[in-house]
Amino acid sequence: MQKVDKFTYLDSTVIANNQVENEIKARISKAAASMNKQNKVWKTTDFFCRTKLKLGLYNSLVISILLYGSETWPVTHTVAKKLDGFD
């Protein structure tokens, strides 16, 4: 086997020295793109598409993309701040 400093596995980048800033930027970018794709849903004022449905869609379609692979990230104040900033 060859030793590498970083690799991508299941669309998540794993880095040897636990620097996750680039991965977090990529996750935020992908989550924002997903949110923009559902722009019609977020702007609708239809009675049946109110807060509860929008929150469920947000959690399943946006937050799941944002936090994919996060179980391997070291949780620092900076990481938490960036994730909270997106949310």
Image (cartoon, rainbow, N blue to C red):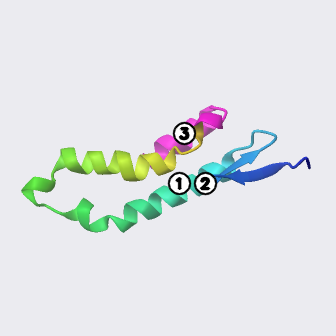
The numbered disc on residue 5 is none
* Prevailing SS of the magenta stretch: helix
- Asked if the magenta segment contains residue 72, the reply would be yes
The picture quadrant where one finds residue 37 is bottom left
Residue, x 67% and y 48% (percent of image)?
21
Q: Measure how far apart labels 1 and 2 are at the Cα level.
A: 5 Å
Q: Locate residue 3 relative to residue 48 in the image: left or right.
A: right
Q: Locate residue 1 relative to residue 72 in the image: left or right.
A: right
Q: Which residue ends up furthest to the front in the rendered image?
A: 1
Amino acid type, label 3: Lys
Give the labeled residue for mark 3: 81
Amino acid type, label 2: Lys
Q: Measure how far apart labels 3 and 1 are at the Cα level.
A: 12 Å
Asked if disc 3 and disc 2 are in contact, CB closer than 8 Å, the reply is no
Q: Measure how far apart labels 3 and 2 are at the Cα level.
A: 12 Å
Q: Secondary structure at mark 2?
A: helix
Asked if disc 1 and disc 2 are in contact, CB closer than 8 Å, the reply is yes
Q: Secondary structure at mark 1?
A: helix
Q: Quarter of the image containing the C terminus?
A: top left
Amino acid type, label 1: Ile
Residue 29 point in image, percent of width and height: 53, 60
Label 3 vs label 1, nearer the camera: 1
Of the image marks 3 and 2, the number of the one nearer the N terminus: 2
Of the image marks 3 and 1, the number of the one nearer the N terminus: 1
Give the labeled residue for mark 1: 28
Give the labeled residue for mark 2: 25
**Range of the magenta residues?**
71-87
Residue, x 91% and y 47% (percent of image)?
1
